[in-house]
Image (spheres, grey):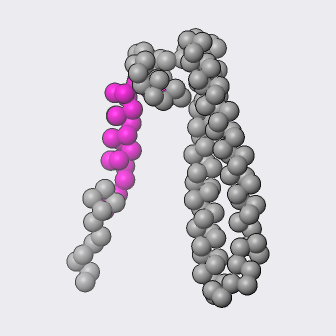
Amino acid sequence: MDDMRERLERELRGTVERLRQLGGALLLEEPGVIGYNSPLPDEIEEIQVSREREITFATRSLLVDRANKLADALERLGSGAYGVCEECGEPIAPARLRAMPEVTTCVRCQDRIERQARQAEPVGSLFGVVEEEEE
Ligand SMILES: [Zn+2]
């Protein structure tokens, strides 16, 4: 289990490092830095910048999420609760923990949770069908 702690700490450091790098990228995207002398209309520039920013925010929130999970996992490791599914209380497969050290559920529970999440989505987005009858 000491291996796992090392692994988790390394992943956590890596995730925090990437977050720091994203922080720098965000500053570069400030309006006025991009778009100087640009022949493009301001509107297009703004759309591009805000889209990049959205992606950055999405990436950032994923990374923050991951950092939190890794920190949680380290805590669980300390308290001896690490590697136990928080849904059903069964041990999580070691191969799964090696692949994703921050997971808190076993494969079966993860499957069930993902299926429930998919079912909660509107039917249209599930099948990628846009309503055609209107045309
Ligand atoms: Zn489970």
Residue at 64% across / 76% down in the picture?
Answer: 46
Q: Is residue 89 above or below residue 47?
A: above
Q: Nearer the viewer, residue 53 or 104?
A: 53
Specify the principal SS of the magenta part. helix
In what quadrant of the picture does the C terminus appear?
bottom left
Q: Nearer the viewer, residue 112 or 57?
A: 57
Q: Is 110 one of the magenta-colored residues?
A: yes
Q: Give the x, y percent position of residue 27.
A: 76, 61
Quick check: can you spot residue 125?
Answer: yes
Image point 58% across, 54% down: which residue?
58
Q: Which residues are magenta?
A: 103-124
Q: Residue at x 68, y 45 (%)?
A: 19
Find residue 87 and report its horizontal and vertical position in percent. Answer: 44, 24
Judge whether residue 96 is colored magenta: no
Q: How many marks?
A: 0
Residue 21 in picture, x, y percent from top left: 70, 49
The structure residue drawn at horizontal position 66% and vertical position 88%, both measured from the top left corner, is: 39
70 above or below 118? above
- Residue 133 sits in quarter: bottom left
**Left or right of 96 on screen, residue 24:** right
* Residue 88 makes an appearance in the image: no
